[in-house]
Amino acid sequence: MTATETIDPPTIHKGLAGVVVDTTAISKVVAETNSLTYRGYPVQDLAQRCSFEQVAHLLWHGELPTAGELDSFSERERANRRIDRSTQAVLQRIPETCHPMDVVRTAISYLGTEDPEEDLSTPQANYEKSLRMFAVLPTLVAADMRRRRDLDPIAPHLGLGYAENFLYMCFGEVPDPVIVRAFEKSMVLYAEHSFNASTFAARVVTSTRSDIYSAVTAAIGALKGSLHGGANEAVMYDMIEIDRPERARDWLNAKLDAKEKVMGFGHRVYRSGDSRVPTMKQAMIEVTELTGESRWCEIYSELEAAMEERTGIKPNLDFPTGPAYHMMGFDIASFTPIFVMSRITGWTAHIMEQVAANALIRPLSQYSGPPQRVLDPVL
Ligand SMILES: CC(=O)SCCNC(=O)CCNC(=O)[C@H](O)C(C)(C)COP(=O)(O)OP(=O)(O)OC[C@H]1O[C@@H](n2cnc3c(N)ncnc32)[C@H](O)[C@@H]1OP(=O)(O)O
Ligand SMILES: O=C([O-])CC(=O)C(=O)O
């Protein structure tokens, strides 16, 4: 009898809920205090005071950059923004009818085929690849958004920082600083969240000694789902369906009566509120004050209050981010690809951490099929 065939049925941790599978030095989520730190720094402080480039450096190197380090980091990021002709040709062949997450997933996979060092997983090689994906993703996402609007792509502006450049590539101009800061805060807040489903997918793939592009491709697939990153899009589709704040309660009650999940609420780890929501909610309010589109904030408040009264379940980060991105002018289907632009930092930090202390990830299962039987020889 092997260790897997014990007589007592093992305890099953469905969805791996509550299971600690490894250590990580990248971020800490504390459900009891609703707190989240990246390398020891509270995420709300990083969002208020740091650029996304600084946070990317922190996640990868463990420390915030000095002024000199930031200069050379930014220079390398800017130098890697352009998409080459063959990637452009691949992108143009992808049907516009597919979801933009499929475009991002295909593009990352394709980038792997172009990299002669695809299978090289030294710390330096993986860092170079991470930086390249980080730099090129905004160009890919902006080009795909414009393609769907029948607009030509805009080349990266090498004189602009990460957030301003992305907004410029989307809209042809750098918007009001309120939008730029709100967008940059969302990038910082989305960057990293310990062993969430997409990061774990990346770590599983890495644990087999596969390459970083394969791991990121798997992570993008995991993030696409509406129980994870796809919720930011679902939130906005729901708000558009609700249309007016006075309809929010009835809409919510009908959802809950039908035993459906309300997108943008609940969390596997946090039970009394997502650490990132207050910062993003404030950013959403600031964008609302600029645009004057108060409807989404009003629907937000109605849904939040009605959900609290009926279930006690609190919003997660996708709830304020959905309407904030809508007011910034992004197409809804691009919300989760924008999440990818941010989470590429956390994913790749975890991939490098996994490589540094690897163990194949392979849990056990309890068999629930038919008992062993004899194969009928006449078949
Ligand atoms: C960046 C991110 O990925 S944040 C998460 C984004 N995802 C969403 O917003 C999707 C909506 N939320 C959900 O589906 C869930 O809250 C999850 C998947 C995020 C976490 O769920 P789990 O930890 O698996 O908890 P589970 O789904 O078992 O919920 C526990 C209870 O709360 C209820 N519940 C949890 N979230 C919700 C919700 N959003 N709407 C309605 N009920 C909910 C469940 O129905 C369940 O009730 P029950 O015990 O009566 O059956
Ligand atoms: O941690 C999770 O399960 C989901 C989440 O909030 C994230 O990935 O940002």
Image (spheres, rainbow, N blue to C red):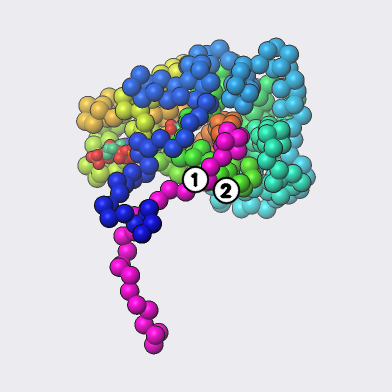
Image quarter where the C terminus lies is bottom left
Image quarter where the N terminus lies is bottom left
Task: Tell me the kind of residue under disc 1.
Answer: Ile
Say if the magenta span includes residue 207.
Answer: no
Residue 168 rendering spot, x and y as whole percentages? 66, 27
Q: Identify the residue shown where x is 34% and y is 57%.
A: 5
Q: In the displayed structure, would residue 39 be above or below residue 83?
A: above
Nearer to the camera, 336 or 375: 375
Q: Which residue is mark 2?
A: 208
SS at badge 1:
loop
Q: Which image quarter: residue 71?
A: top right
Give the quadrant of ligand 1. Answer: top left
Mark with earlier residue (2, 1): 2
Residue 297 rendering spot, x and y as whole percentages? 39, 23
Q: Which residue is mark 1?
A: 361
Within 8 Å of ligand 2, the CB of disc 1?
no
